[in-house]
Amino acid sequence: MRIAGLRLKALDLAAVAAALAVIVLASVRAYGGRPGAEQLHLRGPGREWVYPLGADRTVTVSGPLGDTVVEIRGGQARVLSSPCAEKICVRSGAIARPGQWIACLPNRVFLDVQGHARRSADAISF
């Protein structure tokens, strides 16, 4: 087969086909997936839990200062109460999208949402 003066051999075509297949599979893995399959990863001193954001529950995590109470409700997670002094984690509000997180550093509790992001425009893509 000739393309623009080049003579392609069978192995050349196989290499191009394999490269295209790798690109397609990597793209599907990176950008595919089901929106709405987000999970809350909750870390406390020496432990880690994973909860689906779709199931409502209240979780208590013990830290060095006392108990931090985390609420999962309506596809969002938030810190209801914590024994830390500043209460920044409580005032942070709710998280629901992959990449969002809340940390209570004094009590060593960390929450983050992981999963496939829902497609939407933001200030950068607009």
Image: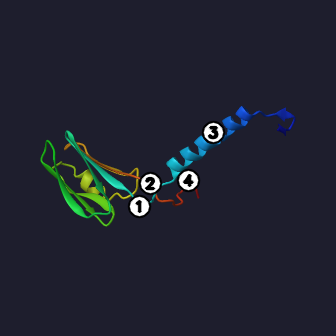
On screen, 121 above or below 15? below
Mark toward the start of the polypeptide (2 vs 3): 3
Q: Nearer the viewer, mark 2 or mark 4?
A: 2
Give the Cα separation between the discs numbered 4 and 1.
Answer: 23 Å
Which residue of the protein is positioned furthest toward the left in this rendering? 66
Q: Which residue is mark 4?
A: 124
Q: Nearer the viewer, mark 1 or mark 3?
A: 3
Identify the amino acid type marked 1. Gly
Q: Position of residue 7 (x, y in %)?
A: 83, 33
Category of crowding for the residue at label 4, using alpha-carbon neighbours closer than 10 angstroms: few (below 14), some (14–19), many (at least 20): few
Which residue of the protein is positioned furthest toward the front in this rendering? 10
Category of crowding for the residue at label 2, using alpha-carbon neighbours closer than 10 angstroms: few (below 14), some (14–19), many (at least 20): some
What residue is drawn where x is 74% and y is 35%?
A: 10
Q: Position of residue 111 (x, y in %)?
A: 29, 49
Q: Which residue is mark 1?
A: 36
Mark toward the start of the polypeptide (2 vs 4): 2
Q: Secondary structure at mark 1?
A: loop
Q: Position of residue 43 (x, y in %)?
A: 25, 45
Mark toward the start of the polypeptide (4 vs 1): 1
What residue is drawn where x is 83% and y is 33%?
A: 6
Label 1–label 2 contact, CB within 8 A: yes
What residue is drawn where x is 86% and y is 38%?
A: 4
Q: Nearer the viewer, mark 2 or mark 3?
A: 3
Mark toward the start of the polypeptide (1 vs 2): 1
- Looking at the image, residue 77 sits to the left or right of residue 12; the answer is left
Category of crowding for the residue at label 3, using alpha-carbon neighbours closer than 10 angstroms: few (below 14), some (14–19), many (at least 20): few
Q: Secondary structure at mark 3?
A: helix
